[in-house]
Image (cartoon, grey):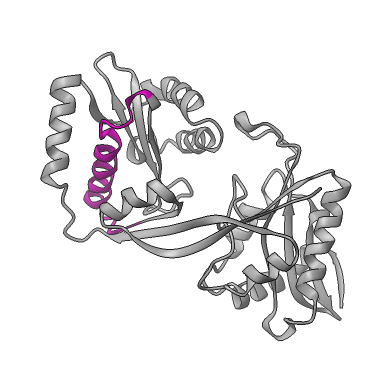
Amino acid sequence: MTIRPYEYTDEKQVIQVWNKCLVKDPVSTEMFHSKILLDPNFDNDLCLVAVDGQKIVGYSLGMVRKFPYEERGMEPERAWIPVMFVHPDYQQQGIGKQLVKSLEEKFDQLEKANITLGAYSPNYFFPGPDKDAYGDSIPFFESLGYEVLGEAVGMDMVLYNFTIPDKIQEIKTNLQQEQGIQIIPFSKRYTLPLLQFLKENFPGGWVRNIRETLEKFKGEERVLLAIDHNDSIVGYCQRAIDDLEGHFGPFGVSEKLRGKKIGSVLFYEMLMDMYSRGIYHVWLAWTDKDAQRFYDRAGMKVMKRHATMKKFKK
């Protein structure tokens, strides 16, 4: 068994083993290309396969930034392991450990002191090991010095017979009558104001999300805005950032106006808009803490539980 960098002829086998190992997170050829090979930070030297003769039995992907990521910049101390797996017939033989250690040696050479499992932006697959589907992976990574820092959950809800609660309708009416705040669909005249709003309030990946959506001319059908009496944006809500129509989020409200239930109105208005378009299932990939409680109250259920894990090199 040897470990070597990924080669283009490995693609079919890697995808086959991926789907045999990560049964709750299968990948297609298109997704493998769009999220890995075509990522601007992809580095063949950090994409490793474990090979037994001509058979691929394991895979690990490392990422470091080659290009600035919006306002986050280069994040020079950080590295990620977005995904790794070993064929079930070859587990418990130290192959996974060798794959991780091989990546860590390369990270050391690049002077990366902060290694995150999953949670890589822009093209993440999951926020960390799935507690239920791949629970054995958590003690495995702990044995290699990775720490569990918290939990992130994926949530979903069926929208059949969806209606906006009367209480939310009342809040919406009061916001408009008393404060001049209303919810409207995005239109192109708000392109620059929306980019500025996100840079000021939610810098980083959210700016990239909206830019990619607007480049596809999908803003009018995928984005809602909250505007005040001065026509200034005070909140925003988006869906289908990865072109999956039922994928909800992100959404947020200007910090100075939080607590006025603007976010609640945005959330329910977006769900009603989705329902009216024939989208009957809404889901979000990653949330935690206070945000999870918000979605709980709205009727969404936890469908996945992930451990958020990191390793801090000394």
- Residue 266 lies in the magenta-colored region: yes
Q: Position of residue 301 (x, y in %)?
A: 33, 62
Q: Position of residue 137 (x, y in %)?
A: 64, 71
Q: Position of residue 263 (x, y in %)?
A: 30, 37
Residue reaching furthest to the top: 230
On screen, residue 53 above or below 33 = below
**Residue, x 38% and y 35% (percent of image)?**
252
Of the 4 image quadrants, the one containing the N terminus is: bottom right
Q: Position of residue 14 (x, y in %)?
A: 70, 70
- Asked which quadrant contains residue 205, the reply is top right
Q: Characterize the magenta stretch by its predominant secondary structure.
A: helix
Q: Is 295 on the left-hand or right-hand side of 207?
A: left
- Residue 269 lies in the magenta-colored region: yes
On screen, residue 227 above or below 61 = above
On screen, residue 311 above or below 238 = below
Q: Is 215 on the left-hand or right-hand side of 160?
A: right
| Stretch of the chain drawn in magenta | 256-282
**Residue, x 45% and y 33% (percent of image)?**
214
The residue lying toward the viewer, choosing from 219 and 163, is: 163
Q: Is 54 on the left-hand or right-hand side of 38?
A: right
**Residue, x 54% and y 35% (percent of image)?**
208
